[in-house]
């Protein structure tokens, strides 16, 4: 993709982000730091804002080169704590998703904090979703993605797709899982086990 095309894509998405930001009068994003943890809330006018909790990080070490990452069940799906370019969020563990997906709301937030830029744009991409339809998105490079709580895995240069739907869930997919030897979900203990 040429530099002109990248700049054009960035301008189109920035305009789209700006339009969506202006049209989402009920949307609130705020941070709170109380010394113990940083928390971020995205409230898109739903009945309650969900708390998004961060984590610390260090490399894949431990017994048998495994790290256990706790997950939380909500409405039948599993959420894990992550940091996207240093910002704590919750993502759905989705082994059926080929890439990592964030919504335009999270992309706008990361852009406003200077955590994604023109250099991070890879280009337009097409994704087939579960109902078989194709969606156009913008593929970007997340410089760093951390997964976990007390123990964390850190991945560099993760390709992610920005979905223009502000309510799109954040999906942690196979682009990340394929970087480790195996991923095991232990439903009895509510942990995901990442092994080298």
Image (spheres, rainbow, N blue to C red):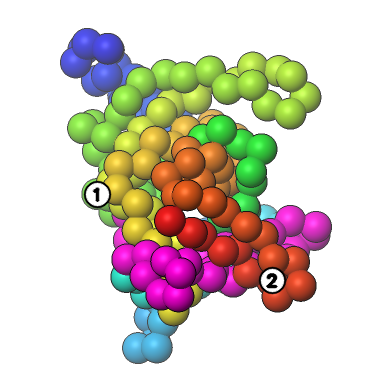
Stretch of the chain drawn in magenta: 59-86
* Residue at the extreme front of the image, as rendered: 64
Rendered position, 46 above or below 17: below
Camera-nearest residue between 2 and 164: 2
Drawn side of residue 40 relative to residue 170, left or right: left
Drawn side of residue 82 relative to residue 95, left or right: left
Q: Mark 2 points at which residue?
A: 190
Give percent across and percent down for residue 138: 43, 26
> Element under label 2?
loop
Q: Mark 1 points at which residue?
A: 114
Q: Is residue 65 magenta?
A: yes
Identified at 45% across, 75% down, the residue is 63
Give percent across and percent down for residue 95: 64, 43
- Which of the marked residues, 1 or 2, is nearer the chain's N terminus? 1
**Residue 104 visible in this rendered orientation of the protein:** no
Q: Give the tally of numbered discs.
A: 2
Give percent across and percent down for residue 38: 40, 76
Camera-nearest residue between 93 and 29: 93
Rendered position, 54 above or below 42: below
Rendered position, 196 above or below 171: below
Rendered position, 118 above or below 29: above
Identified at 64% across, 46% down, the residue is 94
> Element under label 1?
loop
**Which mark, residue 179?**
none
**Mark 1 touches mark 2? (CB < 8 Å):** no
């Amino acid at each position: 993709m040429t530099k002109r095309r990248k700049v054009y894509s960035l301008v189109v998405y920035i305009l789209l982000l700006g339009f969506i930001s202006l049209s989402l009068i009920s949307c609130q994003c705020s941070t709170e730091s109380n010394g113990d943890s940083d928390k971020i809330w995205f409230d898109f006018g739903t009945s309650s804002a969900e708390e998004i909790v961060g984590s610390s990080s260090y490399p894949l070490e431990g017994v048998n080169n495994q790290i256990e990452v706790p997950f939380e069940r909500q409405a039948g799906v599993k959420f894990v704590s992550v940091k996207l370019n240093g910002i704590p969020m919750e993502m759905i563990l989705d082994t059926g998703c080929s890439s990592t997906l964030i919504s335009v709301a999270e992309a706008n937030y990361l852009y406003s904090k200077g955590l994604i830029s023109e250099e991070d744009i890879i280009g337009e991409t097409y994704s087939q979703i579960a109902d078989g339809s194709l969606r156009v998105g913008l593929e970007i490079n997340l410089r760093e993605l951390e997964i976990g709580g007390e123990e964390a895995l850190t991945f560099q240069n993760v390709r992610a797709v920005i979905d223009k739907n502000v309510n799109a869930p954040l999906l942690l997919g196979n682009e990340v899982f394929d970087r480790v030897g195996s991923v095991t979900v232990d439903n009895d203990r509510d942990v995901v086990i990442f092994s080298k």
